[in-house]
Image (cartoon, rainbow, N blue to C red):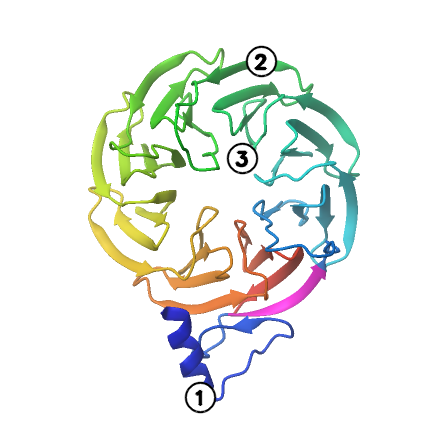
Amino acid sequence: MVLLLGTALAAALGAVSPEPGVRAALPPVPRKLFEVAWQRPFVNPPPLEWRPMEPGGAAADPTSGLVFVATRDGWLHAVRPDGKLAWEYRTEAAAPGGAAVAGDTVYVGTSEGILHAVALATGKARWRYDAKEELGTRPVVADGTVYVASLQDTLFAVDARTGAWRWHHRREAREGMSIRGAAGAVVGGGLVYAAYSDGFVAALDPANGKAAWERLVAPAGDQLDVDGLALGGGRLYAAAYSGAVLALDVATGKTLWSFAAPGATRVAVDAGIVIATTTTSVYALSAEDGMPLWSTPLGGAPWAEPAVAGKWVLVPTGSGGLRWLEAASGRTLRVFDPGTGVSGEPAVSGSRIYVLSNGGTLFALDLQ
């Protein structure tokens, strides 16, 4: 309904898209939110490909200025701020969780179960770790350890320098249906936090993977998956698909508050506000007590975490493009749709935002 209304208004006002190849699904706003600095295609679509997806999104390194995208054709690309290619590395499989940068190394896990460590400056391989399970999250690096979760309910801890296995923590996947995807690990306060498809969240000792606590946080339902996890302000926030967004005490796992949200998929926290997405809507909640501040219907189911860029909330909605919401009100001001939609999390680097389209094209957007 929102997209149809936006299209009708745009037609009535004679609106046109200011960027070549980009469809503006809403009428122009009083001032431009952004302009496209450049765009670079990476994937040559195979014949008869239907609904391509690039869930890995982009990752930016503020020190080098490079941006990294892992595309569905099995390549990791490093791009300079001017859009020129720095190097490419063959991963041989898609990397649905995307890449992560820590120091002088880029880490990426693939659907074939290989965690790659690549030199940031040269694109040369440092090491490969074979998890033997489909890796589905963006790696997280803390205190010399890389954490990455599989789609088979295992969190792996690997030495960041050598690629040696340190430990893993697994919960047996429950019987019945689950939602494809997993929450990335979060690290803070001397613990590592992970979430699982059986509705549990665990706090783990980074030295050995032993659980400090494990809590069932998902309400009763058919799909208990906890695919959203975020840490902020001394609290842990979780999104459970069976119907809740929760705030947990980081030391004990005790639920501090719970907000009913059927189909909750992702969660992020910024400046005391929790941004949560469901299969149909996006919510802003008070981090203190979970009270709703605003909600907005979406034109598509979100596949990745929302990102906060100043006063904007950016929500990738798959075939519905990248939705720009006003953080203070939740009002939709723009939909950036390159024609194939946006499924991956955008990378925010100062006043620039990098967006990978489902067609495999990287866009650099400069905020106005």
Question: Magenta stretch?
Answer: 34-40
Dominant secondary-structure state across the stretch colored magenta: strand
> What crowding class fits label 1: few (fewer than 14 Cα within 10 Å), some (14-19), or many (20 or more)?
few
Specify the amino acid type for callout 1.
Answer: Leu
The mark closer to the camera, 3 or 2, is 3
Count of numbered labels shown in the rendering: 3
The residue drawn where x is 70% and y is 37% is: 93
For mark 3, does the 10 Å Cα neighbourhood hold few (<14), some (14 to 19), or many (20 or more) residues? many
Which residue position is annotated with label 2? 166
Reading the image, the residue beneath label 3 is 137
Q: Earlier in the sequence, mark 1 or mark 3?
A: 1
Between discs 3 and 2, the one toward the N terminus: 3
In the rendered image, which residue does mark 1 sit on? 13
**Corner quadrant of residue 76:** top right
Question: What residue is at 36 percent from the left and 26 percent from the top?
Answer: 198
Label 1 or label 2, whichever comes before in sequence order = 1
